[in-house]
Image: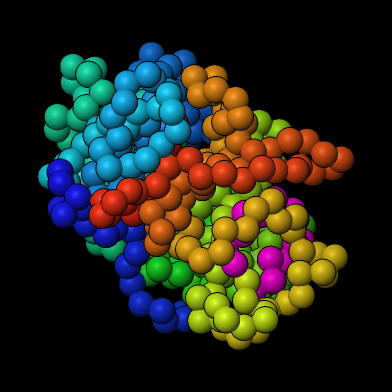
Amino acid sequence: MSSAQVKVSGKTGKYEPHERQAAWNKVVIERPKGIERMTPGRDRSLPYRQSCTLVVAVATILSIASSLLAQDHGIQVPDGFRVEQFADDELAHDVHSMTIDSQGRVVVSGPGYVRILIDANGDGKAESFKQFVDKPTTGSQGMFFLGSSLMCSGDEGLQIFRDDNRDDVADGPAQVFLKIAAGGEHHVHSIQKGPDGWWYVIAGNFAGVNSSYATVPTSPIKDPVSGTLLRLKPDLSGGEIVSDGFRNAYDFAFNAAGDFFTYDSDDERDISLPWYLPTQVFHVLPLSNAGYVTAGLKRSGNLPDMPPVLATFGRGSPTGVICYQHEQFPEPYRGALFVQDWTLGRILVVTLTAEGAGYKSEPMTFAQGKDQFGFAPTDMEV
């Protein structure tokens, strides 16, 4: 695909606030037989995943590997790395999010589809796809496979598509287990299973999360402000609000120690004003508030409940976040955070070095479009 054919993806919907009461529909999730527990959600013993390639979702699906070959596909990466196209726009159009299923296959979602990309000959390039489901209509901005069943955001909220017969096709309509505003730019986004067995969900400032979502007495936050991090019980029967004050964090990641990190957006309307908040990478802590209240109103960064800021990157639109917990990439990338900026077309690295009870970091640019190439990354997986 030429640079002129690259399509902007991953930003949909309208900036409209939604006021909804939380509706918890208890769903008992039983792990399909033969599928052992994965942490979190990946079977890393599968041969397909041993290459530890960084897979990036843009208008086409790209893979970035450590190699001496000098290929870039219009994307500038450090010496020793190469960029390859894994799937083109015909297989993966207008990608909103991406995940790896329990068989190690790349799965993507856009408006009206969830697709399993098939690399039948193992050459590192998908030739076809299996249509898992013709939903969500809005596309999903966050997906997670539990065995053969898919947890995702979209349409009416957080939902599950079951595939009990394992034919790579959803058995029927989704069951919505949490009603929350979904499908818009600032609605609910990523869902992942944490190392503690609970479900974690990141939601933007127009997702409509309010006090009714804090149904567990242990919830650190009872009356949230703006974007939130939710923590749902393993059986999805209730949940907590762990942190708030985000504007529109799209994704998040856990490191090997189980610490939580996200990349929050700035408020571009305030760019020349003294209270402007840039895009920030946070080490998120329970009961922390990231400072965003509403347009033109921000809390001071000096308040004691402000989460540690590991990096700031000025203007941008944060999308995918991962922690690289493998060995194929050299130092300093091992154990580092990789975060994506959709607006400026770049992948940034934030190293994590333990210091006291937290971390110190060294931010750097890992990948960016060059010349007139339209690089607009939306998600990453390893």
Name the foreground residue: 134 vs 5: 5
Left or right side of 113 for 24: right
Q: Quadrant of residue 96?
A: bottom left
Question: Vertical placement of 278 versus 37: above or below?
Answer: below
Relative height, residue 71 to residue 243 (above, below): above
Which percent across, then down, holds residue 194?
A: 60, 40
Q: Residue at x 40, y 47 (%)?
A: 368
What residue is at 21 percent from the left and 27 percent from the top? 125
Residue 286 in the magenta stretch? The answer is yes
Q: Main secondary structure of the magenta part?
A: loop
Residue 128, image x, y percentages: 14, 32
Magenta span: 278-292
- Image quarter hosting the C terminus: top left
| 99 in relation to 273, above or below | above
Q: Quadrant of residue 353?
A: top right
Q: Residue at x 59, y 52 (%)?
A: 262
Residue at x 16%, y 54% (from the top left corner): 4
